[in-house]
Image (cartoon, helix red, strand yellow):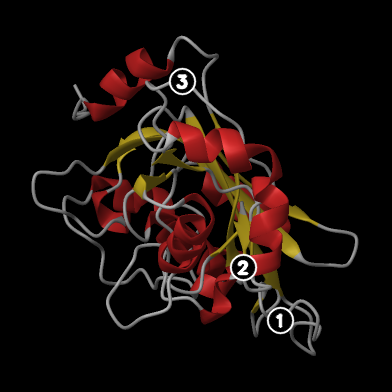
Amino acid sequence: MAYDGTDFSGWAAQPGRRTVAGVLGAELARVLGVVEGLTVAGRTDAGVHATGQVCHVDVGSLAWQRFGGTLVERLAGLLPSDVRVLSVEETSPDFDARFSALARRYEYRVTDARYGARPLQARYTLAWPRSLDLARLNEAAQRLAGEHDFAAYCRRKEHGTTVRAVARLDWRREPDGVLVATVQADAFCQAMVRSLVGALLPVGDGRRPVSWPGELLGRTVRAGEVVVAPPHGLTLVAVEYPEPGHYARRAALTRNVRSLP
């Protein structure tokens, strides 16, 4: 599924707030009747977008037989324009959108154009007031890739771990001049991607040394100097899964609490 997160208070259902799960769940129930266990691959924060989000839900077999083949079209007529279900398929009972995932990939868009973000890009592109050096951004980003304790970049949760394995973190400049950071890992802790971007941007504009973001990996608590980048520049673009038959094994591995040697 895909959504423009601008007018949502994030994914998770919250009383009195417009959320993606709340809107989607209501329309699924309208078509299918009772639905249970709506679970998402990545619980995006308020203002964060998605073009490749994945979720699963349990529905009655009779409702699925009756409406499954036309569910995408039915939801297209019911959902608001800022949420789209792109495809629907039946999967095995051991599939879990969250725990079976192998990797999640995000992109963060930034423009350093003197005039700011173009009007049609402004809802999903951060306007940065200083010129950014692509080489400096990538040099600093390389030092953050790999498995580390990202406590300096995470909002710690009780009984949770801040050890993560970042498989990819790099920047590119698009033909229109917009800079795009691609960040991929098996999982992220809350606000981690936006914190990584927030630490790299002052390196790119020359206010921090290239070594600074990597040096923060030695911290055991969140670094107060790191500014969390605004949510509207961030988009969840893809979620990867193993081949069918390996969902349960992957979910069991994901549930293990990771620690560094």
Q: Is residue 204 above or below residue 148?
A: below
Asked if residue 151 can be seen in this view, the reply is yes
Q: Is residue 183 above or below residue 210?
A: above
Of 176 and 94, nearer the camera is 94
User: Answer yes or no: do the residues labelled 2 and 1 have beta carbons within 8 Å?
Assistant: no
Q: Position of residue 166 (x, y in %)?
A: 45, 36
Outermost residue on the right side: it is 175
The residue type indicated by label 3 comes to Ser
Q: Residues within 10 Å of mark 2 (few under 14, many from 20)?
A: some
Give the alpha-carbon distance from disc 3 to disc 1, as whole Å: 40 Å
Q: Nearer the viewer, mark 2 or mark 1?
A: 2
Asked if residue 166 can be seen in this view, the reply is no
Q: Which residue is pictured at 49% across the width and 75% down the height? A: 230
Checking the image for residue 122, the label placed there is 1
User: Which image quadrant is residue 226 in?
Assistant: bottom left
The residue type indicated by label 1 comes to Ala
Label 1: which secondary element? loop
Of 141 and 73, nearer the camera is 73
Q: Residues within 10 Å of mark 1 (few under 14, many from 20)?
A: some
Give the alpha-carbon distance from disc 2 to disc 1, as whole Å: 23 Å
Checking the image for residue 171, the label placed there is none
Circle 3 is placed at which residue position? 92
Q: Position of residue 96 (x, y in %)?
A: 39, 31
Label 3: which secondary element? loop
Q: Which residue is pictured at 43% across the width and 73% down the height? A: 46
Marked residue nearer the N-terminal end (2 or 1): 2
Q: Position of residue 22 (x, y in %)?
A: 41, 67
Question: Does 53 sit left or right of 216 as displayed?
Answer: right
Label 2: which secondary element? loop
